[in-house]
Image (spheres, grey):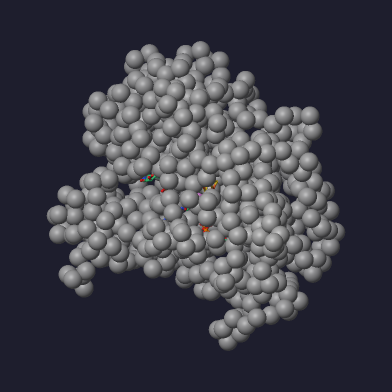
Amino acid sequence: MDMKYVPTTCPYCGCGCGFNLVVQDKKVVGVAPWHRSPVNEGKLCPKGNYAYEFVNSPDRLTKPLIKKDGKFVEASWDEAYKLIVSKFKSYKGDEMACLSSARVSNEENYLMQKFARAVLKTPNIDHCARLCHASTVVGLAGAFGSGAMTNSIGDIGESKCIFVIGSNTFEQHPLIGRQIMLAKQRGAKVIVADPRFTPTAKQADLYMPFYSGTDVAILNCIMQQIIKNGWEDKEFIAKRTKDYDKFKEVVMKDTYSLENVSKISGIPAKDLATAAEWIGKAESSNVLYSMGITQHTVGVDNVKSTANLQMLTGNLGKRGGGVCALRGQNNVQGACDMGALANVYSGYQSVIVPEMRKKMIDAWGCDIAEGKVGLTVTKLINTLADQPGTIKCVYIMGENPMISDPDLHHVEKGLKNVEFMVVQDIFMTETAELANVVLPGACYAERDGTQTSTERRVQKWRKAQDPPGEAKADWQIICELGKVMGYEKQFPFKSAEEIFTEVAKVTPSYGGMDYTRLEKPEALHWPCPTKEHPGTPILHKEKFSHPDGLGIFTPIEFKYPAEVPDKDYPLILTTGRCIWQWHTGTMTRRSENLEREEPTGWVEINPEDAKALDIKDKEMVRAVTRRGQIDIGARVTKDIKKGEVFIPFHYAECAANLLTNNALDPVAAIPEFKACAVRLEKIAEAK
Ligand SMILES: Nc1nc2c(c(=O)[nH]1)N[C@H]1C(S)=C(S)[C@@H](COP(=O)(O)OP(=O)(O)OC[C@H]3O[C@@H](n4cnc5c(=O)[nH]c(N)nc54)[C@H](O)[C@@H]3O)O[C@H]1N2
Ligand SMILES: Nc1nc2c(c(=O)[nH]1)N[C@H]1C(S)=C(S)[C@@H](COP(=O)(O)OP(=O)(O)OC[C@H]3O[C@@H](n4cnc5c(=O)[nH]c(N)nc54)[C@H](O)[C@@H]3O)O[C@H]1N2
Ligand code: SF4
Ligand SMILES: [Mo]
C-alpha cells in the first residue's frame, strides 16, 4: 500500500489552519494533524477534520457540460472552449461580467481579474467579499489607510480584554476562539455583544444581548462613557490621529447616554457602563468582529465605529490590541488582495488612478478595460434583474449566488435574463443549473497554490491527488481560455508558482514573497515588500498607512436598519451560520459526518414570542417577509433575544435568502443580511 501525508491549508475558514492530507494509493482518504502549523498547532475544528470527505464525492463534476434544449450534455474541453470563445467575442466589454471566488487560490484570483480586464476588457469583476467584508475594506481603509485585520491570531491570546461584537467566533472561527480561551486563562476579561446567546457568548464574563442593527448606538455609548471617565488615551489621540474634536462632539450627545442607548439596544445601562470600564481601563484591549458588524446598510459606519473605539483607547499598533476583522472564507483576504474587486487591481491599486492603470497595461502588455469602477456582485444582480439586456454574458467561478445572495427571487430573475452564462465549480450547484456551460474545476486537494488567511498570512496548498475525470485546476482553465481568446503572451503559465512570480512583481505588499520563502510552516504575513523583509504580523505600529501617517476619527450617528418591524412583520430576522455547515452547503452537505449533525434549517425563536404565537418547539412554521416565504422547523430557545428570530442560510430547502432584504450600504454595497422584518405563522393557520 502506497501512503503519504501532504501538509496543506484548510479550505474552509479564514483562520488558515494547517493539516496533513492522508493519501492512500493516490487518493485522499483522511486528515491528520500537522503539529508544525503555528496557527493551530495540530488542532482542528470539525470542518477541518472532515475536509477530506467531499473530495472524492461521486457527484464531483468530471467533464465540461453544455446545455442543449434545456438539458446538460457532456462535451470535450475543445467543444466547450469553442462555444465560450465564440460567445465571449460577440459581446462588448461592458456587456460582460465575471465573478471570482474566495474559495480558490491567490494565483487563480489574480488570473481571473486579469482575464476580465485584459481579455474581456470589462471592468465588471467582483466576488463574495462584497457580501462579507466589503464594509471592512472601505471602513478600515478610511480610518487607518489599510482595510485588513490589524493584528495576528496568536496576538489575540495576549490581550487583557476582548470585546467580541458581531462574531460567533467559537462556531465560525473555532481556532481563533481557542485564542480567546487562552487569553481568558491568562486573566483577560471577555465581553460578548450578540442578539443570540451563542457558544461564544456562553464563555463571556459579560454578555450583552441586543437588537440587531443597533451597533453604532452601543459603540458610541461605550465611547461616551470612556471619555466621561477620562479613560481615553490622550497621548495616542494627540500624536497619532486627527479629527478627534468632530468625533467627540457626536459621541458626547445625549442620544448616546447610558439610559437612551439602553432603550435603543435593549442592553441594561449598568452592563454598558461595565463594558466601558473594562475596555477603558485594560492594559490592552481588542475588538473582534465579523458579519454582525459588516452586513448592514450601515456596515461602513459600524466598522468605522470599531476603529474609533480602538483609536480612542490607543489600542492600535500594539500587542493584544487591534481591530480584528475576522475574514470568513479561506481566501477572501487573498481574493481582495489579488484585485478581484470592482475598484482595484492587485494590492489595492485603484482602477481610477491613471498611473495604476498604465502600470497594469505595461505589465500585461496589452490594452485593458477602461479605468472606471465596475459593477459589484450586488449591483450586478440588480442590473441583471432590473435592466435586462445591459449585461448579457456572465462568467462565474466558485460562487453560488442562487443560495448566497439576498432576495433569491430577484437573483433568479436576474440570472435568467443572462444570454450566456459560464459556471466553473466542483459540483453542480443551484447557480450552475442556470448556466449554458459548466466547467469542472479541481478542488483544493488537487492543485498547488497559495491562500491568504485573515491574519494576512500567505500559506500554501499542496497537491495531494489528481482531479477526478477531466476536471482541471481553475488556473489552468483560465490560462487555456486566455490562450484561445488570443492572449497567449498574457497567459503563458505552466505552474501556480510562475503565476505567483508575476503577482509578486506587480503587487507591492506581496513583492518580497516567493514559493521558497512560503514553504516554511509559518509562511509570511503581508506587507512583505522585499526579499529581505520578514513580513508584518502587526500593522500600524509607528504610523498608519495614510500619507500623513495619522489615523482618522469619523463622527458617526446611529441609523436604524432599512427595514424595521411593524404591525405586519413584527419580528427582526437575522441570519448566519452554524459550526457544521459551510455557506450554500455544496461541500459540507456532501460530508457525512458534518451533514448528520445539522441536516436541515431551523428558526430560533424566544419562548415568550413562541408562546404569543402558539408555536411549539420543532413545529413547522411559515416565515414570511416582503420578499418571500419559507416553511421551516421552529427551535424555541432562550438563547435568542425576545423580538428577534434567527435562520441559518445554508439550506436550499428552506433558504433564508428567499426572505432577506437586498438594501445596500451606500458606500460598500454590502446587503443587510443581519436585519429585516419578518412574521412567523402557524402553518395550519397560514393560507
Ligand atoms: N462553520 C462555518 N464557519 C464559517 C462559515 C460558515 O459558513 N460555516 N463562513 C465563514 C465566513 S465566509 C464568514 S464571513 C464568517 C462569519 O462569521 P460570523 O460573523 O461569526 O458568523 P454569522 O453567523 O454570520 O454572524 C455572527 C453573529 O452576528 C450576530 N448578529 C446578528 N445580528 C447582529 C447585529 O445587528 N449586530 C451584531 N453585532 N451582531 C449581530 C449573530 O447572532 C451571530 O451570532 O464565518 C466563516 N466561518
Ligand atoms: N442570509 C445570509 N446570506 C449570506 C450570508 C449571511 O450571513 N446571511 N453571508 C454571506 C457571506 S459572508 C459569504 S462569504 C457568502 C458566500 O457565498 P458563496 O461564495 O456563494 O458560497 P459558497 O457556498 O462558499 O460557494 C462557493 C462555491 O465555490 C465552489 N468551490 C469550492 N471550491 C472550489 C474550487 O476549488 N474551484 C471552483 N471553481 N469552485 C469551488 C463550491 O462548490 C461553491 O459552489 O454568502 C453570503 N450570504
Ligand atoms: S478553524 Fe477554520 S481553518 Fe481551522 S480547521 Fe476549522 S474551518 Fe479549517
Ligand atoms: Mo463571508
Residue 255 x %, y %:
29, 30
Q: Does the rendering let one see residue 6?
A: yes
Q: Is residue 189 above or below residue 591?
A: above
Residue 295 x %, y %:
44, 47
Frontmost residue, 214 versus 401: 401
Q: Does the rendering let one see residue 360?
A: no
Q: Is residue 194 above or below residue 92?
A: above
In which image quadrant can residue 227 be found?
top left
In which image quadrant can residue 525 be found?
top right
Asked if residue 592 lies left or right of residue 605, the reply is: right
Q: Residue furthest bottom?
A: 69
Residue at 72 percent across and 78 percent down: it is 76
Residue 172 x %, y %:
46, 46
Q: Is residue 8 above or below residue 240?
A: below
Residue 97 x %, y %:
62, 62
Q: Is residue 116 above or below residue 572?
A: below
Specify the quadrant that holds the N terminus.
bottom right
Residue at 74 percent across and 33 percent down: it is 529
Asked if residue 88 lies left or right of residue 433, the reply is: right
Specify the quadrant that holds the C terminus.
bottom left
Frontmost residue, 96 versus 311: 311
Frontmost residue, 474 versus 417: 474
Residue at 61 percent across and 39 percent down: it is 35
